[in-house]
Amino acid sequence: MRIWTERVGDPDLPAVLMVMGSAAQGVSCPDALVVQLVERGVQVIRFDHRDTGRSSVVDFDAHPYTIGDMARDCLAVLDGYGLDSAHVAGASTGGIIAQWLGVHAPDRVRSLTVMSSSPMGHNPGPARARAMAGEPADPDDLPPPSPAFVAHLKAGLPPGIESDVALFRVFNGPIRPFDEPAARAMLELALSRAVDPAAAANHDRAVWVDDPSLLAPLSSITAPTSVVHGDQDPVYPLGHGQAVAALIPGAVLHVVPGMGHVMTSPGLPEEIAGLIRL
C-alpha cells in the first residue's frame, strides 16, 4: 500500500503531522493554515488517507481495516520521512486517530491537537440514528448532531460537487461566513485527484469494525494536548470536545466562537493554526 504525502517547510525543523477527517484528502487541510504553521517554525506534513486521493485503494470486503489501522498509516508516514516523532494535529475522525496515537504510540507524539472531534471509543452512531428518526436523545449520549446536519443527511442528495458544497455549507455552521469559492475549489481539486472517489466511503465502514484498541483509556495520554472545538459544530456539538478535554490529563480546551466542523470561513485557517499545540 502506498500513501501520498507532501512536506512543506524546512526538513530540519520539528514536524507537524496534519491528520484530516473521514473521506478527506490531505488537500482539505487549508494552505493558509500550513503557511501559518511554517511561519511558526515547523515543517508540515499532509497526506491522503488510504482510499482517498492519490493513496492506494483497498478492497475493503477482502481486507477490512479499522481506525487503528489508519493510525498506523500515520506512523508509516513518519517512518517514511525518517521522523522519530511529530506534533500531531487531527480533525474530526483525524482527531480520533490523533488520540489513538497519543495512547498507543506516545514516544512518537510531541504534542496533540484534537480538533472538531469526539472521544476515541465513543460511537456516535446510536445518537445520530435517534436524531435521524426524530427520537429523543438518550441522556447517556453525547449531544446529537444538529437538525441542519440531520436534514442534509435525510435529503439524500446525489453524489457530486454540488452535494459536497451543500454539505460543507452545513459543516461551516450558520454564524461565520461560508467561503463557498474556496470550498468549491478544494472539493473540485479533491475530485480531480482521487484514484477512486467512491472508495472514501470505506472510512464509514471502518468505524464499525471491532477494534479493541479504541477502548484504551484517554487518561494514559501524556503528550501536551490542546482541544480545539467550534461552538457551532453540527456534527460533533461542543459537548464532544469538552468530553475529550475532560478525559485527557492536562488538556487545554479552546472554544472557537462561531466555528462549525470545518475551516471554510475567511481567516479561520489562520486562527486555528495559532491554536495548534507546538
Image (spheres, grey):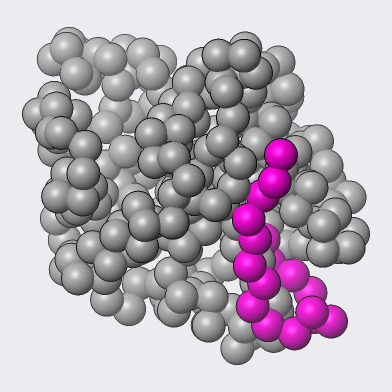
Question: Is the residue 79 above or below the residue 275 in the image?
Answer: above
Out of 246 and 261, give the one closest to the viewer. 261
- Quadrant for the C terminus in the image: bottom right
Quadrant of residue 110 within the rendered picture: bottom right
Q: Residue at 31% across / 57% down in the picture?
A: 187
In-image side of 233 versus 89 (left or right): left
Q: In x, y percent, where is residue 7?
A: 67, 72
Q: Is residue 7 found inside the magenta-colored segment of the image?
A: yes
**Residue 274 seen in the current view:** yes
Q: In x, y percent, where is residue 70?
A: 65, 36
- Quadrant for the N terminus in the image: top right
Q: Is residue 106 found inside the magenta-colored segment of the image?
A: no
In-image side of 51 versus 250 (left or right): left
In-image side of 154 versus 6 (left or right): left
Q: In x, y percent, where is residue 43?
A: 70, 77
Quadrant of residue 167 within the rendered picture: top left
Q: Residue at 28% across / 15% down in the picture?
A: 129
Quadrant of residue 265 within the rendered picture: bottom left
Out of 66 and 5, give the one closest to the viewer. 5
Q: Residue at 13% across / 15% down in the picture?
A: 134
**Residue 259 seen in the current view:** no
| Residue range corresponding to the magenta coloring | 1-17
Total residue callouts: 0
Q: In x, y percent, where is residue 174?
A: 14, 55
Q: Residue at 63% across / 23% down in the picture?
A: 65
Question: Is the residue 178 above or below the residue 145 in the image?
Answer: below
Out of 212 and 155, give the one closest to the viewer. 155
